[in-house]
Amino acid sequence: MQKAKLVVLGSINADHILNVTEFPRPGETVTGQRYKVAFGGKGANQAVAAGRSGADIAFIACVGEDDIGDRIRQQLSADKIKTAAVEAVEAQTTGVALIFVNQDGENVIGISAGANACVTPDYLARYRSLVENADILLMQLESPLETIMAAAGIARQSGTQVILNPAPAQKLPDDLLALLDVITPNETEAEYLTGIAVKSDDDARRAAAVLHDKGIQTVIITLGSRGVWLSHDNHGELIPAFRVKAVDTIAAGDTFNGAMCTALLEGADIQSALRFAHAAAAIAVTREGAQPSVPWRGEIDAFLSQQE
């Protein structure tokens, strides 16, 4: 039997991370330590989570014509992702995040979109058939909004389910929301979209109702260590997360989204898919970094077998 297909459209970044005692002031040079380059970007993180958890996945994205772009594409292939639609763009750099982390764990970040800005509607048009032939399209908000709108429109015409993780937080037009089947905001993103501060289950219920009124069938509001509020078929419920000792929450939400798509493609009901996604995210928060923290399928299955 042919596996159901996932397409992720999104961003790729190289994260340059330097730990410093204090942030430098204007004109000041400080000496840092533990410099590292990690592969990130919300689109790539979610694609890696889906690939490692077992999905048949293709990724639509751009890298720069540089060494790090080549290395990222090789790594994506190793993570079981089809990369034919991940092109290197001439005279562009791969997206970059420059991150200083101080001794209190606070960070300041500067981002250059670089090649991510080249994921235009025209670029998407070259890979239109990937969206048309997919069962699920997963997107975030680090790509140009007009491309996200165009992809959602193609998916709707083709009967491809559209899942949007609306991060980073921003307001979105109603005509985009009307094209979505599933939306997965956290509390902050839900407030941006609905005007309702999500502090309780009742707040989550009210925020979900606003999003249903915009035409979205399934609303999944992620609530950190508490779990998620699932609102679906006129019914809302809390699906609790697994309790683990968190080391680093970077990419936990991305891991959740990618793994959830894998489970849905395998025919799981929504509650079971969320439990699978919770397991993947629980493993990720016990490890440092973005993509290095994302678990493989065997690890997720083993974790779940221990929860019975």
Image (spheres, helix red, strand yellow):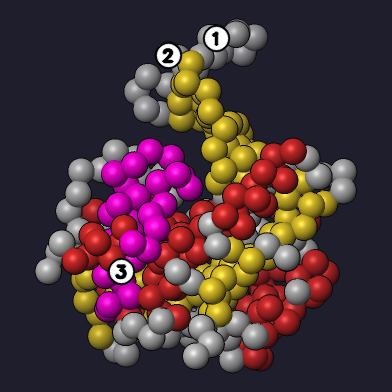
Name the residue rendered at 61%, 87% in the picture. Answer: 156
Contact (Cβ within 8 Å) of mark 1 with mark 2: yes
Kind of residue sitting beneath label 2: Thr
Q: Which residue is mark 2?
A: 21
Kind of residue sitting beneath label 3: Phe
Name the residue rendered at 64%, 66% in the picture. Answer: 82
Q: Position of residue 55 (x, y in %)?
A: 48, 72
**Residue 201 visible in the displayed image:** no
Q: CA distance from mark 1 to mark 3?
A: 43 Å
Q: Which residue is mark 1?
A: 30
Contact (Cβ within 8 Å) of mark 1 with mark 3: no
Q: Position of residue 2 (x, y in %)?
A: 53, 87
Is 277 a magenta residue? yes
Magenta span covers which residues? 271-298
Q: Which residue is mark 3?
A: 276
Q: Position of residue 93 (x, y in %)?
A: 77, 41
Q: Nearer the viewer, mark 3 or mark 2?
A: 3
